[in-house]
Amino acid sequence: MRIKKGFAKREIAGSNIVVPVGKQSTQFNGMITLNDSASFFWDCFCNDITIDDAVKMVTDEYDIDADTAKKDITNFINMLKEHNLIEP
């Protein structure tokens, strides 16, 4: 799974902000502010990867166990799905 095309993540005044661009700007009205963990997850899911791939990337980068990483990633994916931001 991956994040839909048409969204750009930028760092603005120390905050990670996601905004729609192009066609997505007519379908998604708003912006998303990401904390550091969510920003890392966002970057992971800009590519077509599995949850297990993302867990591995997170546990390699952060001092966190796989179960906690999977729970956090699953919550993030659910948020993306709620806002129709993820491709199957």
Image (cartoon, rainbow, N blue to C red):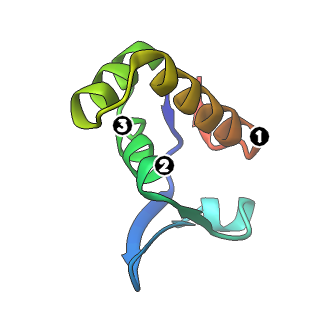
Tags 1 and 3 in contact by the CB under 8 Å rule? no
As shown in the figure, which amino acid type bears the numbered disc 2?
Answer: Ala
Tags 3 and 2 in contact by the CB under 8 Å rule? no
Which residue carries the number 3 mark?
A: 44
Placement of the C terminus among the 4 image quadrants: top right
Could you give the CA–CA distance between mark 1 and mark 2, rounded to whole angstroms?
A: 15 Å
Vertical order, 76 against 64 (above or below) = below
Residue 2 location (% of width, % of height): 47, 32
As shown in the figure, which amino acid type bears the numbered disc 1?
Answer: Glu
Q: Earlier in the sequence, mark 1 or mark 3?
A: 3
Q: Quadrant of residue 77?
A: top right
As shown in the figure, which amino acid type bears the numbered disc 3?
Answer: Cys
Residue at left offset 43%, top offset 41%: 41
Question: Which secondary structure, mark 2?
Answer: helix
Question: Which secondary structure, mark 3?
Answer: helix
Could you give the CA–CA distance between mark 1 and mark 3, rounded to whole angstroms?
A: 19 Å
User: Which label belongs to residue 38?
Assistant: 2
